[in-house]
Image (cartoon, coloured by chain):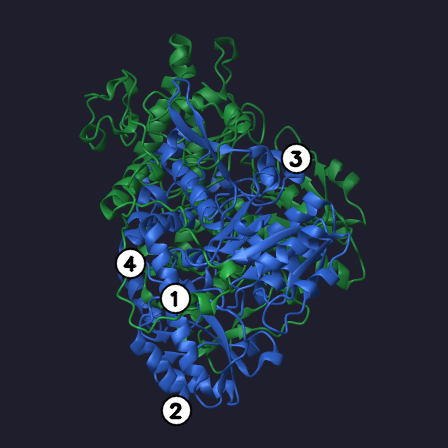
Chain colours: A blue, B green
Amino acid sequence: MRFTQLTEPQVKDMLATIGASSVESLFASVPEAIRCNGNLNVPRGVSELELLKDLNTLSGKNKHCEELVSFLGGGAYDHFIPTVVDAMAGQSELLTAYTPYQAEASQGILQLFYEFQTMICQLTGMDVANASLYEGATAAAEAMTMAANIKRRHRIIVAESVHPDTVAVLKSYAHARDLDVVVLPTPDGRVSASKLASMMDDDTAGVIVQSPNFFGCVERLDHIIPRVHEHGALAIVSVDPISCGLLKSPGDFDADIVVGEGQSLGIPLQYGGPYLGLMACRKEFLRKMPGRVVGMTQDEDGRRGFCLTLQTREQHIKRERATSNICTNQGLLAIRASIYMATMGKQGLEDVASQCFHKAHYAAEKIAALEGYSLRYDTAYFKEFVIQTTRDVAKVMASCRERGVLAGVALSRFDEDWADCFLVAVTEKRTKKEIDLLVDALEAV
Amino acid sequence: MAIGSEFATKKSDRSSAKPAQLEQATGRGSMIPDLQKVNHPLLFENGAPGLCAVNLPTLDVPTTDKKAALPAELIRTAPTPLPEVGELDVVRHYKRLSHRCFSVDENFYPLGSCTMKYNPRVNERVAAMPGFAHVHPYQFESDVQGMLELLYRLRCDLAEIAGLAEVTLQPAAGAHGEMTGLMIIDAYHVSRGEKRTKVLAPDSAHGTNPATCACCGKSTVSVASMPDGRVDLDDLRSKVDENTAAMMITNPNTVGVFDDQIAEIAEIIHAKGALLYLDGANMNAILGITKPGDFGVDVMHYNTHKTFSTPHGGGGPGAGPVAVAEHLVKFLPKPQVVKHEDGTFGWDYHRPDSIGIVRSFYGQIGVLVRAYTYIRSLGRDGLRDVAEKAVLNANYLAARLKHRYKMPFPPPYAHEFILVPEFESAGVTQHDIAKRLIDYGIHPPTMSWPIHHCLMIEPTETESLATLDHFVEAMLDIADEVENNPSIVKTAPHGMPVKRLDEVAANRRLNVRWQAES
């Protein structure tokens, strides 16, 4: 059998040691009435060769972003991943280890997480970070719960300009946790600080905004966050980590909790997951933050070492009084993001952000100059923008696809009110030639 | 050899020799003998200003004036303080860190409840295929038919293995699956005009169970276990009532016992209108033996990293698909992957009774691709073989260790078992035994849970007899050491980069990030 390695004689010897007559007899506690006796309607196992043929065929049925020219974004971006990231994150010592409960035998992973936490703080401008959560939307939901616990309040305001999946997940979580989620409309593509102020009340625990937001627009955190604090609520900011190479960090504006989708940091698209939930906060909230946290300490000889810390917040100690039910982190993806950030470094991240900015602005100006296409929002943006068109969006998308171009995300999938809009993302990977191809394809529709 | 300590050992050595005799071992440790003992610098202590390990193409579009396009108040004025390291030093840094970890690929890892089985290499190869790794979640469905077909096949296989009607692949991890399951259960009761707030769980339940209940606004009531590890049915009967939404149970349970009363438990729960939730953490023990749907389970989650061999990755990513019985299908999260009448595949968003979405996009797809690959490799016979060998290995270890270690629960065991070292007179605890195992190149078992002073041992099905015997001999040697030289056990481990760490100080003087010295 694949992957087990006991011979028949060995099995016999082992049974003799146990004092059992058969392997079957080891299952004596499973009543006969509920046994399926191997009657599983699952295909028979196949050899590795057959398996690879079958899965190569399935993989081959997918048109992927290395063979199409992709301007798709909306929370998942086609950024360049340096070879070093795959090479070092693929090391099987990292791949096949588990949660570093046994610190002495896990110093490598613990140090890696400590460095990850540090780099997330460096990017977000926050005091402390955890060793990652599932992905961006659930990270925002955990921040919502955290704010409600800290403030002992029940209401959360979330901007409509936050990713629709995040808003939906917030609602699902809030329903289960008896919190109220109120959506702040953003007809201008970003939050109006005065409108936000008018919605605040004494039961508002936190306000969740995303910047750059779902429409690609940059939110005025410098205007928003003071209004949140005026009402004693917490400012929760969801951030695209790449944007921190160009834009000030949420921490620069006094954010309380920063969350984000870390997929941009060296994680392949993988059809939407697994990705990387980021969370950082002020140090006074550290004990209320969910998720794994690694700390530096010393061994009995005074040698520097690392271990899991603040475990008394976690479910395996605190059970029903834990800060969250989360039991794992996205270890391998935190490792990938660490290697990505180490590889890019200070200069590389600035270059990536800068190239995204210039290329997106070049693309937007060209598209907006075409007849029948315009920028939906008249506001500052980073690497992504919404195009409104007088043409049929589905036809536009299909026509571009015929030319090998994925022109953007049709926003009708989120809201029928946005049926004449699509979202275009431009990363550093797109060349001038590819952008011109998109412009030509849009014009030819 | 300059490993340093006379107790030093090579973590990858699988022989049954005692650690002190392992000094002459060959391999990585002998090539870079003192690397393990050297304080490995932090990334931030490496490099020099101006270094960078990446170069991007020259910008080929006209530039845009940032100050004109962005509000001045929002533009970064100083670069991020990220590290500045050259490519070779980035590689060396992560290479050296990887040497400082125990892993399934190098070490026997009998971490109870975590199912640290071999992760087949082919799974990684498949997940890296471009048609799986580089597809965007918002591509046209017609462009991702292969991906959708794989996901559809996987959800059907998982439903079949569970003996339940339908599966959602959306949850991101086991605990996330629990939450999804409880939300489904809540939706079911609400649809019947009921608001039930109580969830029962045996006292041996995973910590995630009560934590999940709390996240879902439910209170947990603990049900007593009998001395043999099974649920105390009288206690269960006295606690289940019309306010009980569900019982969360793990079977085989966390003490390694398959509760043969499970069908009766289901009846007791169902009689009060409550539902039975199975924590699928221990599915490895019953694959192809019995199906949860056949013993009365209404909802369950899988842990793909446990049962279907997706890598644990230092803590994740996992995936937590949830299977439900027919009466709960309409509450599953949306969208659902479906096969259309014309044979094509797509996402169904039209599910009006759905609990909604529990994460962005569709799920931990890269993890699910690996799980599917594993199921295809094994097939129905291979899956049953997994359960048989996992259970055989656990019972073999227990049989060989029972003379030196107390077994608080009676055999036969499922895929894991619990033992209690009784060395109080020598002042040696389960903690010390665990740390000493590290010197033998073995990752310690789970400690002090689900009962005090215990070790929870799960060998998994993929280990060879030689490895199992090495573990037994290590455990027996350590028992001898406790008698003859207890200090060697109490001060273990000896061959690691660090000795026992001051975890109390780590909590008291919190240092959770590096700061530049100002």
SS state under label 2: helix
Q: Earlier in the sequence, mark 4 or mark 1?
A: 4
Residue type at numbered disc 4: Glu
Disc 4: host chain: A
Give the label, 2 or 4, closer to the camera. 2
Q: Position of residue A268 (x, y in %)?
A: 38, 60
Q: Earlier in the sequence, mark 2 or mark 4?
A: 4
In the image, residue A73 above or below residue A85: below
Q: Position of residue B394 (x, y in %)?
A: 44, 35
Residue type at numbered disc 1: Cys
Which numbered circle lies on residue A36?
A: none
Disc 3: host chain: B
Separation of marks 4 and 1 at Cα, in angstroms: 41 Å
Residue type at numbered disc 3: Asp
Check if mark 4's residue and mark 3's residue have beta carbons within 8 Å. no
**Residue identifier under label 1:** A356
User: B386 and B503: which one is in front?
Assistant: B503
Name which quarter of the figure residue A61 lies in.
Answer: bottom left
Residue type at numbered disc 2: Ala
**Residue identifier under label 2:** A444
Q: Position of residue B26 (x, y in %)?
A: 19, 29
**Residue identifier under label 4:** A48
Give the residue drawn at x 58%, y 25%.
B452
Can residue B300 be seen? no
User: A184 and A408: which one is in front?
Assistant: A184
User: A249 and B452: which one is in front?
Assistant: A249
Which numbered circle lies on residue B203?
A: 3
Check if mark 4's residue and mark 1's residue have beta carbons within 8 Å. no
